[in-house]
């Protein structure tokens, strides 16, 4: 096994891109980031909260489940969650334009109930 890059802050939701890069969320950093084939990390967008899962949508945007954020601690060299962030508001579903980094919050509730910790997202062959 070979490490491509280090320094990511709790990565999840990797998406392999055609150019050889990988787009992923960094939950602790609150970002959507790109890791190049040479291991360079570039922040695409600051999503806030805790971006927790990602998928490339049929329109070319990356859709993110945002859990709303965690509090964190490091013990024994390992990063771990310790609870809900002090500034937690709600979870959300967001869309990020890869060309501009613009973040659009699409949903914070479903049928009148606040989203609480959405975790993953996928699209089917029909875009739904």
Image (tube, rainbow, N blue to C red):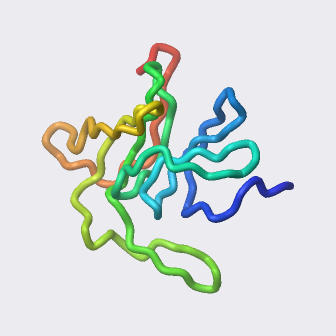
- The quarter of the image holding the C terminus is top left
Q: Residue 124's x, y, as percent? A: 50, 21
Q: In front here: 58 or 46?
A: 46
Residue 43 in picture, x, y percent from top left: 51, 50
Left or right of residue 48, residue 81 in this image: right
43 vs 94: above or below: below
Residue 117 lies, with reference to residue 23, above or below; the image says below
91 sits to left or right of 45 = left
User: Would you place residue 27 above or below residue 79 in this image?
Assistant: above
Side of 80 relative to 118 (left or right): right
Residue 70: horizontal and vertical position, in percent? 38, 67
Q: How many marks?
A: 0
Is 115 left or right of 12, judged from the image as shown?
left
Report the residue at 42% width, 51% height from top. Answer: 51
Residue that protrudes farthest toward the left in the picture: 112
Identified at 58% across, 41% down, the residue is 23
**Residue pictured at 32% horizontal, 70% vertical:** 85
User: Looking at the image, is 3 positioned above or below residue 70?
Assistant: above
- Residue at horizontal 43%, vertical 46%? 45
Q: Nearer the viewer, residue 24 or 102?
A: 102
Furthest residue in direction top, as rendered: 126
The residue at the far right in this view is 1
């Amino acid at each position: 096994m070979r490490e491509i890059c280090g320094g990511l802050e709790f990565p999840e939701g990797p998406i392999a891109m055609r150019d050889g890069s990988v787009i992923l969320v960094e939950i602790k950093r609150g970002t959507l980031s790109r890791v190049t084939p040479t291991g360079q990390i570039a922040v695409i967008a600051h999503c806030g909260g805790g971006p927790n899962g990602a998928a490339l949508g049929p329109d070319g945007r990356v859709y993110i489940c945002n859990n709303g954020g965690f509090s964190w601690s490091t013990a024994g060299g390992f990063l771990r969650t310790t609870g809900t962030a002090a500034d937690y508001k709600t979870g959300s579903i967001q869309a990020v334009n890869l060309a501009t980094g613009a973040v659009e919050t699409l949903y914070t509730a479903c049928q009148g109930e606040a989203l609480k910790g959405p975790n993953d997202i996928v699209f089917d062959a029909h875009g739904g």
